[in-house]
Image: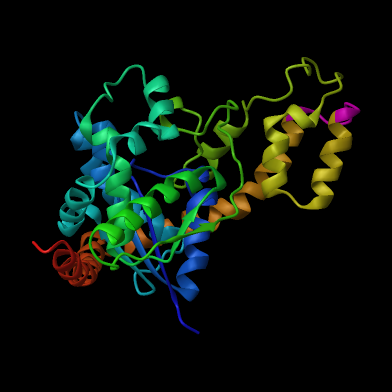
């Protein structure tokens, strides 16, 4: 069977949390078994919002890749590399930017949303507006036929396809239009029922010890109507019950559902049962992380090897692109 080419990246943001694991890494691990996968550290993308805090980008790379390895991403099965170490990305980004109409970028829903939400940061920059063009270059460089995305990210991939169509129309058919590979993702909120983020202090990290993880689970937000142990609750609006849906078996979920509604169990009891299921997921990752760190494996050597492989593919693609543009 012909293997599909898959391209996906992650911004270096330091230690990863459960949301990253369930939303991205579980799918990467599956994809690498039957596809030709390119997974990259998107440090140039990180610059679009962290341009004045570049130290945090560099400092985060090793920790993030260690979390990848601990989660089962295998550098023998997938090409793992750093975006900025493949300068061909910048060249293709430049060429694609010459043909991308400005209104295509200005109507990007993520661009508008970030401008509204990131009120403490100045994102009125050319780089932030044009990041979808860099994203298109990342994908088109490797002739990726599959790009793992959630349903809300499909419009972003369609912009890549539009840019590729325009290039092929203006010059020559040499850019492959990628298809969205819709991934199953478990919606996991932070411990305070907001989006899980280290900046909010509500994230359970893959590197947390069992004690540290429980310390974050214990005060988790539950149904506010349950002020006392004897108060009946509504699990449908309880964040802990949502975690049960991901980490607990059907029998436990049913027991919690009834126990919460009838005040037959308390919130701490509910959290302990959920935590047992969470630990079955976290403990193997935590142990693998310890093994990776103690083995002395060089993350930089893994990235250097992956970068060499990526540059070989990117270099060949840019020969085609330059020929098409006739420069």
Determine which quarter of the picture holds residue 305. Answer: bottom left
Q: Is residue 230 above or below residue 323?
A: above
Q: Residue 238: x and y, percent?
A: 72, 29
User: How far across and down, in percent of the image, does residue 88 sit?
Assistant: 17, 59
Q: Residue at the location (21% across, 44% down)? A: 58
Camera sees residue 290: no
Label total for image: 0
* Residue 262 belongs to magenta span: yes
Q: Give the vertical position of 139 relative to 256 (above or below).
A: below
Q: Left or right: where does residue 202 sit relative to residue 126?
A: right
Q: What colour-coding does the image apply?
A: rainbow
Residue at 53% x, 31% y is 195
**Quadrant where the C terminus lies?**
bottom left
Magenta region includes residue 199:
no
Please indicate whether residue 210 sits to the left or right of residue 240 in the image: left
Q: Is residue 72 left or right of residue 62?
A: right
Magenta part of the protein: which range?
Answer: 261-267
x then y, percent, for residue 250: 81, 51
Instruction: State the residue in front, 102 or 37.
Output: 102
Q: What's the residue at 21%, 32% (across, down)?
A: 126
Residue displayed at 24% across by 40% down: 57
The picture quadrant where one finds residue 182 is bottom right
Question: Is residue 129 left or right of 33 when viewed as pictured?
Answer: left
Where residue 308 sits: x, y (%)? 19, 69
Q: Nearer the viewer, residue 249 or 147?
A: 147
**181 relative to 128, above or below:** below
State the residue lying farthest toward the front.
170
Magenta-highlighted stretch: main secondary structure?
Answer: loop
Farthest left residue in view: 327
Question: Compared with residue 305, is residue 56 higher up or lower down, i.e. above or below?
Answer: above
């Amino acid at each position: 069977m012909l293997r599909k080419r898959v391209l996906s990246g992650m911004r270096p943001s330091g230690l990863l949390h459960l949301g990253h694991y369930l939303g991205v890494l579980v799918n990467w691990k599956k994809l690498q078994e039957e596809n030709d996968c390119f997974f990259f550290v998107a440090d140039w993308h990180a610059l679009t919002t962290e341009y004045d805090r570049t130290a945090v980008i560099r400092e985060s790379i090793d920790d993030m890749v260690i979390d990848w390895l601990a989660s089962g991403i295998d550098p023998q099965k997938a090409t793992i590399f750093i975006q900025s170490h493949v300068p061909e990305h910048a060249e293709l980004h430049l060429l694609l930017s010459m043909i991308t109409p400005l209104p295509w970028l200005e109507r990007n829903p993520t661009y508008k949303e970030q401008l509204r939400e990131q009120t403490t940061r100045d994102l009125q920059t050319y780089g932030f507006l044009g990041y979808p063009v860099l994203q298109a270059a990342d994908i088109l460089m490797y002739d990726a036929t599959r790009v793992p995305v959630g349903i809300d990210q499909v419009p972003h991939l369609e912009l890549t396809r539009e840019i590729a169509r325009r290039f092929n129309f203006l010059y020559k058919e040499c850019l492959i239009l990628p298809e969205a590979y819709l991934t199953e993702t478990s919606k996991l909120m932070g411990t305070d029922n907001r989006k899980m983020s280290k900046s909010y202090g509500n994230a359970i990290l893959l590197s947390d010890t069992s004690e540290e993880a429980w310390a974050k689970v214990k005060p988790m937000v539950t149904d506010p109507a349950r002020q006392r142990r004897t108060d009946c609750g509504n699990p449908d609006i309880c964040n802990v019950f949502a975690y049960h849906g991901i980490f607990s078996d059907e029998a436990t979920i049913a027991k919690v559902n009834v126990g919460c509604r009838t005040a037959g169990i308390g919130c701490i009891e509910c959290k302990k049962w959920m935590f047992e299921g969470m630990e079955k997921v976290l403990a193997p990752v935590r142990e693998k992380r310890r093994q990776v760190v103690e083995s002395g494996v060089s993350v930089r050597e893994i990235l250097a090897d992956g970068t060499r492989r990526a540059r070989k593919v990117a270099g060949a693609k840019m020969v085609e692109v330059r020929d098409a543009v006739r420069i």
